[in-house]
Image (spheres, rainbow, N blue to C red):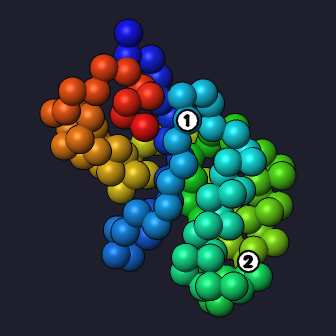
Amino acid sequence: MLGTGRVVFSLDCFDREAISYSADTGGISSEMVRDLLTENLEKRFGNALKVSYTIEWLTDNGSCYIADATRMFARSLGFIVCTIPVRSPESNGMAESFVKTFKRDYVYVNNLPDAASVL
């Protein structure tokens, strides 16, 4: 049985770089998203406490992203928090394309019998 793996990731919309990610065979929590935001800040701005310039943080409407704790934390780091319209995956096309490409080019072509192997 394959099981389910969940991945939270951050893409740079300018150069399409995957900045950071976190994965689990359980659900994605608000805490995991906040850790991801911290990792993004460190990778892009070093030891800065806030982003150096205006950056929008675009997410879907998953509970881990729209949680008050997540949104407040993102704003405290200087991000402008934005969400895509509900039931509008085309508004998040870059992320949807990234997931599709990852599945096609990595998951489906390798002998990965379960979610733990994929992770």
**Amino acid type shown at disc 2:** Gly
**Amino acid type shown at disc 1:** Asp
**Mark before the other along the chain sequence, 1 or 2:** 1
Q: Are marks 1 and 2 in contact (CB under 8 Å)?
A: no
Can you see residue 82?
no
**Residue 35, image x and y in percent?**
69, 57
Identity of the residue furthest to the left in this view: 109
Quarter of the image with the C terminus is top left
Q: Which picture quadrant has residue 80?
A: bottom right
Question: Is the residue 38 above or below the residue 100 in the image?
Answer: below
Identity of the residue furthest to the top in this view: 1
Front residue (pair 118, 11): 118
Q: Mark 1 points at which residue?
A: 24
Q: Which residue is drawn at 38% across and 16% down?
A: 2
Q: How crowded is mark 2: few (under 14 residues within 10 Å), some or many (20 or more)?
A: some
Front residue (pair 29, 113): 113
**Residue 33, image x and y in percent?**
66, 51
Image check: 31 left or right of 115? right
Image check: 71 left or right of 87? right
Distance from Cα at disc 1 to Cα at disc 2: 27 Å
Q: Which residue is drawn at 56% across and 60% down?
A: 58
Question: Is the residue 22 above or below the residue 10 in the image?
Answer: above
Can you see residue 90?
yes
- Please give the label number shown on residue 32: none
Q: How crowded is mark 1: few (under 14 residues within 10 Å), some or many (20 or more)?
A: some
**Residue 46, image x and y in percent?**
62, 85
Q: Mark 2 points at which residue?
A: 78
Quarter of the image with the N terminus is top left
